[in-house]
Amino acid sequence: MNPRLAHFTTLRLGGECRELVTAAGAEDVAAILRHWTAQGVAWRVMGGGSNVLVADEGIPEAVVRMVAEAAECRMDDGLVCASAGTALDDLARFAAEGGWEGVGFSTGIPGTVGGGIVGNAGAFGAALGDRMERIELLTPTGERRVLGRGELTFGYRCSSLQAGRSVVLQAWFLVKQGDRGRLMADREDILALRREKHPDWRVLPTAGSFFKNLSPEVPGGRRRAAGYFLEQAGAKTMREGGARVFEKHANIVIAESGATARDVARLTTRMAAAVQAQFGFALEPEVRCWGEANSPT
């Protein structure tokens, strides 16, 4: 039996893939991808599975998971270097414990450094692309390359890496020396704020914020929270099958026991339609959909 991807995503949904391998390091990834390429096997890369909705019917591709069992962080000439499989919260913890300021915004964000860079994850007005100095990639041909920040393009919850087939291996981030006590206190404040407003993905299956926040009304202004418009449109009371909107945050969907990926697709389509009807604009999903059966019909 092929592995079910529901076991590897924070939504705990999704059918089978052709094959799944968890990579321990760069050489393992290179060997796996060379083998699949030689066999003509299509493949995808998954990090922590925190921003993915996989179709109930699964996907035809093989999947390589870039997930480290423990934090793989170090200081390298004044930069914080982390492997792609390192959890974003572990990156934040490592920096705070060392008294290094610059990546604390990643505290409590589920997912990994590699996936976070590809999607330019962030919070509190900051994002990984703002702090990244350089990355090491594995190209589709198996070549390891190091690219500087100027060779990549980052936008709101997106990057130029999404258009290619290269795999992030590790990344270096700009930091500066700070006060360890203050940084650790800031970290606890962020964790407390997340506990207050967000579900614990380890307890309640979720992908976090489903839709991207909207562009500022004026240049240089703050982005407008999608959750605000969803709440005004009545999303907090919505449910489709086993999928429901989180009672404390209108932009977060919970997959209860028995939920399906199609339930989530139906619910989020309905949520977006309510905002479109009331406010006249379309919401853009932040969660990526894998598979052809995630339509609401």
Image (cartoon, rainbow, N blue to C red):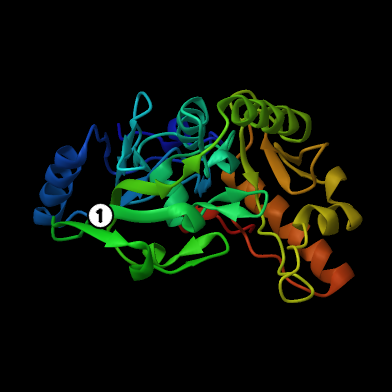
Tell me the kind of residue under disc 1.
Answer: Leu
Name the spot of residue 233 as percent of width and height, x first.
88, 58
What is the quadrant of the C terminus in the image?
bottom right
Residue at mark 1: 137
Label 1 residue SS = strand
Name the spot of residue 181 as percent of width and height, x first.
61, 24
The residue nearer to you, when weighing 1 against 143, is 143
Question: Does residue 167 sit above or below 74 in this rendering?
Answer: below
Tell me if 79 is positioned left or right of 155 in this view: left
Asked if residue 293 can be seen in this view, the reply is: no
Question: Does residue 216 sit above or below 39 in this rendering?
Answer: below
Name the spot of residue 175 as percent of width and height, x first.
46, 45
Asked if residue 171 can be seen in this view, the reply is: yes
Tell me if 249 is positioned left or right of 1 in this view: right
Name the spot of residue 139 as percent of width and height, x first.
20, 59
Image quadrant in which you'd find residue 180: top right
| Residue at 38% from the left image edge and 50% from the top image edge | 59
Image quadrant in which you'd find residue 196: top right
What is the quadrant of the N terminus in the image?
top left
Question: Does residue 221 sit above or below 256 in this rendering?
Answer: below
The residue nearer to you, when weighing 13 against 286, is 286
Categorize mark 1 by other alpha carbons within 10 Å: few (<14), some (14-19), many (20+): many
| Residue at 34% from the left image edge and 33% from the top image edge | 3
The number of numbered discs placed on residues in the rendered structure image is 1
Tell me if 69 is positioned left or right of 9 in this view: left
| Residue at 22% from the left image edge and 36% from the top image edge | 25
